[in-house]
Amino acid sequence: MSNEIRVRFAPSPTGELHLGSARTALFNWLFAKSKGGKYILRIEDTDIVRSSSDFEKSIINDLKWLGLDWDEGPGVDGSYGPYRQSERQKVYQAYAKKLIDAGIAYKCYSTLEELEEKKRQSLSKGIASKYDGRCRDLSDEEKKKFESAGRKAAIRFKIPSTKVVIDDLIRGHIEFESDVFGDFVIVRSNGSPSFNFAVVVDDIEMKISHIIRGEDHLTNTARHILLFKALGASVPKFAHISMIFGTDGAKLSKRHGATAVNEYRKLGYLSSALINYLALLGWSPEDEKEIFDLNDLISLYTIERMSKSPAVFNLEKLNWINGQHIRSLPVEELTELVVPFLEEDKFLKDKLSLYNKDTLIKIVEAISSNLVTLKDAPVYARMFFEEKVILNDELKELLESEQSRLVLNEFLKILRETNLSSKEILKEIGSKMKEVGIKGKNVYMPIRVVLTGKTSGPELFYILEIFGKEKCIKLIERCMDYGL
Ligand code: GLU
């Protein structure tokens, strides 16, 4: 085997890209990038019933969104394609033949019913069920009898009795006795390769040097090592990533909320934040730093800093990271990401054209500190698009106080009679009011309320900037017309 580092992410397109799978993809990607190796995407669609091209498209779309591009795989030519298992039938057949010819695999004619019955018997005796090897040593005559009875044979791998050793890059030394596994199917009776077989054949053919995948594959790995050896191939290095649990200690599932990458995209999480958070599920940098982009991660990532213990998915932490990423984006870029979420909002959809691009950018700047996810944007942006300000009794009362009247009169005067900038206007009203002993909240709250109908929101500076003088004057006059 050459010394080239080649890793792969091998999703089965039987569902949307799950957070756990995205994390596996990320660690493979980081491993390759940090070591100058190659990252391969392989679509494992041997389960024809559950796989679909829609799921494949959606997975590919999500991987692209996350920025985890591949060096070889669907849409990116390489020397070891095709990269979709359904297009590699001939390769599997050739490998299966090799094993049969070498006497390492054999035809098995057992029917599903027979196997199920055996399973039932084992379970009723409290024995772990495994294939009993009933077709291991069939005579030619027996085989012929099955065949003339119309039975279709699957092909099983003859498991040697041995100790399987995994020196896992994350979990350390692990041993299995191969006797715990029954001879497993490598080619089903319909001619399609089993998952365990196709994976090994492809890992050999695609010259994979390191296999990084979930801990749930650990027992598969033991089977795979036996196959690698039986096929005379060198065995790649393995790293099994710990599982992700919810805060309740159960394996992360729908029960804990969204689990698919595209759900998080629709909920308004940034891909950079999701990447950042997933990297911290099972890996940690040497220092306390917690905010990273992909480039930082490439330079910091080492497999030695991956943890054996389960990772705990914590939405609050993800939310915090998302907020950090939102606020570190240049506001122009953030605006591009926010606009589709504003467009999704029924109320805002037709009103976005009220403002030009620069003002939209200002609106996004004004609300960015409130955003946990991009989906929060319409709620905070709404006040900039509202035509009327509605005041409840409590707010009316606030505006009716003598102090408020003084503030609003003076504010109106400054707006009408000066040519000051928003910043200067706010300073001016502050100092004018100070002269008559009105300060702080008592100055700025009536202004905020009269302009927005709310007691909290973005800085007043943004409200003046975005509304402009005319609109501010109109809103105050309208209020005064009502006798306030
Ligand atoms: N296709 C397998 C899965 O989606 C991955 C197998 C592997 O990484 O070896 O679980």
Image (spheres, grey):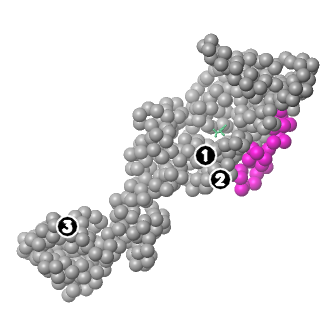
Element carrying mark 3: loop
Q: Earlier in the sequence, mark 1 or mark 2?
A: 1
Residue 431's mark?
Answer: none
Q: Position of residue 23 (x, y in %)?
A: 55, 43
56, above or below 243, in the image: below
Residue of label 3: 392
58, above or below 252, in the image: below
Q: Amino acid at mark 2?
A: Asp
Q: Amino acid at mark 3?
A: Asn
Quadrant for the N terminus in the image: top right
Q: Is residue 82 magenta?
A: yes
Which residue sits at x=73%, y=25%? 113
Residue 54's mark?
Answer: 2
**In the foreground, 11 or 278:** 11
Numbered range of the magenta stretch? 70-96
Label 3, label 2: how many angstroms apart (C-alpha)?
51 Å
Q: Quadrant of residue 447?
A: bottom left
- Residue 465 in view here: no
How many residues crowd around disc 1 within 10 Å: few (fewer than 14), some, or many (20 or more)? some
